[in-house]
Amino acid sequence: MLPLAGCSGPLSALDPAGESARSAAWLWWGMLGLLGTIMLVVFALWFLALRRGPAKTEADAGRTARWWIIGGGLVLPMTVIVLILAFGIPLGQRMLPLPVAGGEPLQINVTARQWQWQVNYPDTGIRLTDEVHIPVNTPVDLHLASDDVVHSFWVPRLGGKLDMIPGHTNVLRLQADEPGTYRGQCAEFCGTGHAHMQFRVVVHDQAGFRRWQQGVRE
Amino acid sequence: MIRRRFWQHPASLLLGPVVWAVWFVVLYAVLSLACQQGWLVNGGDHPAVINLLLAGAGLLVALGLVTAALAAWRTPSQSDFIPRTSAMVSACSAVASLLLAVPGLIMAPCL
Amino acid sequence: MSQAPSAEQQARHDRFERVWGNRPGWGALSAVNHTTVGLRFLVTGLAFFLVGGLLAMLIRTQLALPEQEIIGADLYNQLFTMHGTVMMFLFAIPVLEGAAMYLIPKMIGARDLVFPRLSALGYFCYLFGGLIILSSLFLQIAPSSGWFMYTPLSSSEFSPGMGSDFWLLGITFVEISAISAGVELVVSILRSRAPGMSLQRMPLFAWYILAMALMIIFGFPPLILGSVLLELERAAGWVFFAVEGGGDPLLWQHLFWLFGHPEVYIIFLPAAGIVSTLIPVFAGRPIIGYRWVVLAIIMMGFVSFGLWVHHMFTVGIPQMAQAFFSVASMLVAVPTAIQIFVWLATLWAGKVRFHLPMLWVMGFLIVFVCGGLTGVMLALVPFNWQLHDTHFVVAHMHYVLVGGMLFPLVAGLYYWLPHVSGRMPSDSMGRWGFWLFFIGFNMTFLLMHLTGLLGMPRRVYTYEAGLGWDWLNLLSSVGGFVMAVGVATVILDIVLHFRFGRRAAPNPWQADTLEWAIPMPVNAYNFASIPEIRSRHPLWDQPELMQSIPAGEHRLSRIEDGRRDTIGSDAISGEAREVMHLPSNAWEPLVTAALLAGLCLSLLLKTYTLAVVFAVLALVACLRWSWVNGLHPRMAPRDRSGELPLHSRTTDGPGRWGMIVTLMADGTLFASLLFGWLYLWPVAPDWQMPEQSPLSVWGLLGSGLVLAGALGLWWRQVQGAVSVGGLGLVTGVGLVHCIALGLTAFDAGLAPGNSAHDSILAVVLAYLIFHSGLTVLLTGLQVFRVRHGYTSRALPYELRVLHPLWGYTVAVYWISVAVFLALPAAFGGGA
């Protein structure tokens, strides 16, 4: 296992700073442990099978085989699937833009075009390019659209990505735990500028966010 | 007689998966259409009627396939290869059809 | 051959070679023999593999260090697009088709595939199409919007050059070979097995290939349709995927992945078939759980069509729909696990001999299981949202494809080399090649999982330093080069073995399947006599076959009237039913493929007059081909007495089966078109349904009734009243229908440049006119064939072949009327 220090990085999905990203990272470690163990056991069995002598009788062979196939081929994957889905589906549901108790989440419209991000705050009329400012610990709904080709909005440390498709508007819910600057990147291939189509998400504390709004308006 | 002939025919190997596939398409199409046409409120009550309906339908499909599997298993035949294999395929398809309905039970529709 | 054959055997061999062999020199281009065509597919595919590998090396060079500018963004985009395209379409699928074409007749005890000229046509389409696609790279105008061609990026607005056209036209051209191989393999496996080889005695490899071929039949048409629509949008300005006018870019993604995901299993199944063939041989015992494997193959074939949306989890599809696809994606782990444990149990119960091919099988197991498990992870929606389109997916996909396809392929290559060359591969050099490749592969791609987790997106031509990706990318690149050295070693090993390998003993691996009863190195006709099969493991349970087959002790041991023939058998029981006479060396495939290549090039250069000329010439070539067929004296013996009838004198020969399988592919294409209509109608943001359909209801109904009348008249002909006059009448009535349909279409005044609604209607009308026209044309041809005596009351074979086409044409006509006319009339109107 690599030291956890190796997992940090400005775009690392393993260094979460938001609820959604944390769930995803948690899912990764959980599945790695579970599926990694299965993998090692299967390898070990194969290794043993190569070393072993042949079965004594055909009946013996048939019996063992039935256990292998029913146990390993049916029961094992079914159990794993149910387990993973049982944890995964509810976690996934919590990442969705569900209604928030006590008011509407902050809405921000992001429109992508080759190769920049137009950010627009409908409440305040603030317009930015390649930069999103959000308050900490507050659910934010990003309304994602595209002016030209398919792009994808992704801030790995805060949560999963969502595509921006011409003619459609998708809503991505993000929430940051601590103030700071997080990097975002276009994740869907969009032409020659794809590699450099990046942006920043600046997370302010509540007071700082109000100050920033004021500052921009003046 | 016809039934017995069917289970001895290789076409019976495809019965289970075909039912599974049709069930899949129906499930997906009904749900997409229901959400698209606004027959269901976005993120509304859970479990909604549609959840129970889908889960019930899944159960029915699975039961049907299990019956088919039993019928195939019991079919007498000089060579049991095809009826037995059909039975196993149908049984697996029953489980698969049931699993498809699980999200329908635990999730709110149209999210 | 180790034992010297007797003089009589040698004489028989010479007689067979004269009939079955290829022509010398340039004449070899007319070869249709499955051994030759299969090997050509394999060699060409491996050449494309080297090209694809070279592109990968360039990609890894560019990514080795951060902020490099060795290769610019535009060229890099061309490189990764072409890497994916070449590896998928020009290497993986054709090579496996080639392997199947080479092996299947030999394993099931036939002398050739049932449509030999079709295999040759497929090969030339593949070769020419591949070269056309590749040429774009040398002209530096290669496609650059990814092998998945997502529109609008690939549209004429955002990719104005010729790159996307090369992809769309070239790939569609190459797909002719996939479909033709699919049809041919299905019919051959079902109808040309050695007598006594019932379904349950079929080698597992044949089950795998049967499933693969059927998946090609159902999997490729959505892509072909999508490519045609996108090319129409690019070249003619019609609307299918553009939002303005009522299209939707997501339709392309659906059509593409509807093909794209089954495709992964189309690649995996034959490779797994190789593993299921090798493991019992090296474990020295029959596979345990034959039935379970058949079950796994069937389940896999079906389930793999229900997962395509897992490539689209981030496009904003309703959650519950995503959950279905998530469940289905995980379900596919079950048949995979069944196969893994069947192999495990077989090894467990057997005594394993560890030869070189087994090393590659072990490599397959390790790499593929890793890839499968990351696949389960990616099937989980919330995890997928994080890792989609990162290098994690690149790693996963290479583990699955290289693990699931390349490792078994090399194992199979080593295993069947003696069959082709009569010599054994070297052990030591082969081991070096394996370990270099295995270590290099894991170094490249195991680390890439972490690169992706640390946030590196796919398809970026460069990246900043200091994001934690630097050392990972460097090591991946080093690993890539180690892997390349491994590939070079393997190739060198294989080339050298043709010269220095020691002579192989008969059946060198003590295998159970029939192909090893063919004397080595391989001959042109496979079996000097076709045996009766009484077991699932013929060479283990009937070892005398090794001698008795070449000694001519079984069926069809004499060449009759200098013609090629093999046994046609019942699809289920494998009982012998007829003698299939097969075409000999022919130029039609090469000529037809060359004309189609001309068509493809003229479409590419937008010289449409020339395109029409080529299309007409290609049609003429096809008609000429079909003329020399059936009971034409160049194709069929005048008469032959024997216990079995000739297939062209039956009513249910391979041609009819081929027609039905082809129509299944055609029907899938039509269904994809219906899907496009039913998808765009409710989903596309700007969809406009006119209040009143532009098509004349009376025109369509009238024309349809005439068609139904023609079908009635046709029916009487098929039922036995075969006559020149009767068939002439059918043709005439059919022609009236075609004209009425054409007038209705012309009268509608569709404006496909303005709306998706009109564009789809135009495509549907073109589709209907094409089918009606083709049916009438082929019926008209029958009038002349009756006059020549090739078809008659006593010999209705060709009418029987055409019969399903008639049914199909009428069916799609009325389905179209219902879906495109009646449905909008009932529910449409501005929706």
Image (spheres, coloured by chain):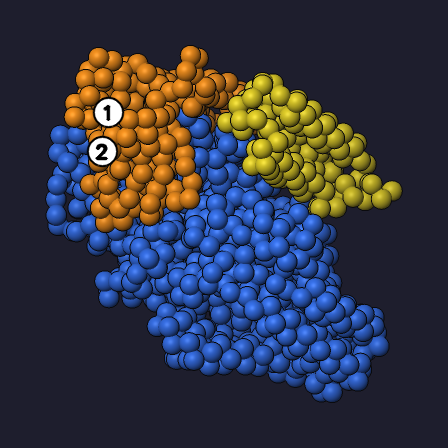
Q: Which amino acid, by three-letter code, is at mark 1?
A: His
> Element under label 2?
strand
Residue occupying the point 84% across, 77% down: C721
| Within-10-Å neighbours for mark 2: few <14, some 14–19, many 20+ | some
Q: What is the x, y in percent for residue C766?
A: 57, 67
- Are the residues tagged 1 and 2 within 8 Å (C-beta)? yes
Are both tags, 1 and 2, on one chain? yes
At a point 31% along the width and 55% down the height, the residue shown is C158
Residue ID for mark 1: A133
Q: Earlier in the sequence, mark 1 or mark 2?
A: 2
Element marked by disc 1 = strand
Left/right of residue B95 with respect to residue C39 in the rendered view: right
**Residue A139's x, y, as percent?**
35, 18
The answer for which chain carries disc 1 is A
| Relative image position of residue A74 (x, y in whole percent) | 57, 26
Q: Quadrant of residue B75?
A: top right
| Chain that appears yellow | B
Depicted C821 relative to depicted C335: above or below: below
**Residue C578's image quarter?**
bottom right
User: Among the chains, which one is blue?
Assistant: C
Q: From the viewer's perspective, is A6 left or right of C89?
A: left
Query: Which chain does the orange colour mark?
Result: A
Q: Please, which residue is most extreme toward the bottom here? A: C787
Looking at the rendering, in which quadrant would you find the N terminus of chain C? bottom left
Circle number at residue A128: 2
Q: Is residue C512 among what the camera can see? A: no
| Residue appearing at x 49%, y 41% in the figure | C308
The image quarter containing residue C734 is bottom right
